[in-house]
Amino acid sequence: MKTESKLEKILAAGHLAVTSECGPPRGAKPDEVIEKSKYLEGIVDAVNVTDNQTAMVRMSSLAASVIIKQQGLNPLFQVTCRDRNRLAMQADIIGAYSFGIDNMLCLSGDHTKFGDHPMAMNVHDIDSIQMIQMVKDMRDKEIFQGGAELKGAPKMFIGAAANPFADPFELRVMRLAKKIAAGADFIQTQCIFNVDKFEQWMEGVRAKGLHKKCYILAGVTPCKSLGAARYMAKRVPGMDVPQEIVDRMASVPKEKQAEEGVTICVETIERLKKIEGVAGFHIMAIEWEEKVEEICERAGLLPRPQV
Amino acid sequence: MITAERKPLEELIEYVKPFKRILLLGCNECVTVCAAGGRKEVGLLASGLQMAMLKNGSNIEIHQHTLERQCDPEYVEELIPMIDSADAVMSMACGCGVQQIAMRFKDKPVFPAVNTSFMGASERQGVWAERCQGCGNCLLGITGGICPIARCAKQLMNGPCGGSTGGNCEISEEVDCAWQLIWDRLKALGLQDMYLDNIPAKDWRSGGGNGPRKIIREDLAE
């Protein structure tokens, strides 16, 4: 065990872990964070707190993580490379750990072009792989990125993202290997609709033994509507939504689409359970947190194990 | 080369409006190559300004001159005989040239006529693209000759990110994914294994992180 993280304990004990997501509000509205977190209490093992997702300014992931921690849940603090240099990152990581937050996800971050401040500088002092390395050294070598000794080291359970659906496909297993070499303890994948392609990626992952070096949490998302399915299929870079999913959503009347989306999600989880190397699920029900309980219930993931 | 584009005429008119006699300076290097501020562009801008000022009912005298390079003090000295007869100078050189003029002639207002953009290369006739950001520690030897700092929108040194689609960057179909290009080159060179090496965090001091940079060649300095 590398940390005291509850998420690590669950995974190390061999249970399928379940994580979900909470996007902080675009304003100083802590009650909204509290409300969202209530839907996830007792349902998931950790809650990802996004960091200026889609390059739109929101309450900081650190602040929202603290609120979630105070509600008794287990935050998974996301940090992108886009908005902070390495000093600010290390300061935030130490700060987060000082509140007892011990899970984090190291990400590149969506380009500012997509958000509400396209005129801002994209920082990218370091990239996500260098961030993983930095956090690993802070934790295990107890040093800052610049080399000086770090007393009061943050014992973070280090996560990264993986996208089996981005191009070039042939690189995607190697990229996971790079992240693991840098120190990633677990990864969460981009949401999976194309299970066949995910299986192909997992074959490559297993061939290199990477599933044994790192816990892989398979990402899933319930489509709220046909419009949502189409949007994800066409407008989100790095997402693979097969036409048959869109067609299935289109085949049911509007008032039944949400239900169909949840059903597809549950079916996907059942298929993913059978894939060797999948250590858990990351359920991204964006602005639909109330559905996570139903999804977990129907997918046989409740009650959550106590460790 | 350094690329630049001419500023909109309206902005340039605002700069020259208060003056009667302008010295309009072109540069024979980079801005000539990208057709922004060479001899020809000096001529075009001089006509444009004169016509605009006439329309407003005022006259303006524009003396045109093009230097070999405006970033070299030796060439800037050539302006001594013509500087007194000008109320103000407008330079069509890149920012380096404009500043050289301003530093040499401290009591003359100096205005830029172009927006200096990037260090780049020509892709084809009339098209220039960013290639180098002067990071001061060139890593082209380990990235198959493609720069991830200048050509990756997130300057990833261990890319690509999850947004790479069909060889394009997530920000636009017009922009190549630099890491796709790097990967293709590594494959062509049989160096795929190199991709697995994690490039460590960059020391940005050589790239301007230590303040404005200077190169001093003792063997050449007087």
Image (cartoon, coloured by chain):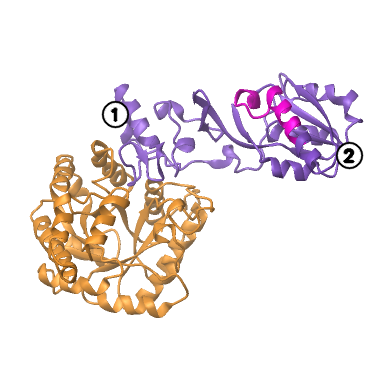
Chain colours: A orange, B purple
At 36% from the left and 38% from the top, the residue drawn is B168
Label 1: state its secondary structure. helix
Tag 2: residue type? Asp
Q: Earlier in the sequence, mark 2 or mark 1?
A: 2
Q: Point out residue A242 in the picture as x, y percentages from the top left corner.
A: 18, 50
Residue at horizontal 70%, vertical 28%?
B44
Residue placed most toward the observer, A190 or B107:
B107
Is residue A126 shown left or right of residue B45?
left
Q: Magenta stretch: dominant SS? A: helix
Residue drawn at point x = 18 percent, y = 71 percent: A255
Say which quadrant the C terminus of chain B sits in. top right
Residue at numbered disc 1: B192
Residue A130 visible to the viewer: yes
Q: Which mark is residue A63?
A: none
Quick check: marks 2 and 1 in contact, CB under 8 Å?
no
Q: Secondary structure at mark 2?
A: loop
Chain letter for mark 2, please.
B
What chain letter is assigned to the residue under label 1? Answer: B
On whether residue B42 falls in the magenta region, the answer is: yes
Give the image location of residue A4, x and y in percent: 29, 66
Q: Residue furthest right?
A: B84
Residue B174 is situated, as x and y percent measured from the top left of the image, at: 41, 37
Label number found at residue B107? 2
The part of the chain drawn in magenta is B30-49
What is the quadrant of residue B155 in the picture? top left
The percent position of residue A83, horizontal first and vertical second, equals: 48, 55
Please name whichever residue, B24 or B2, is drawn nearer the observer in this view of the structure: B24
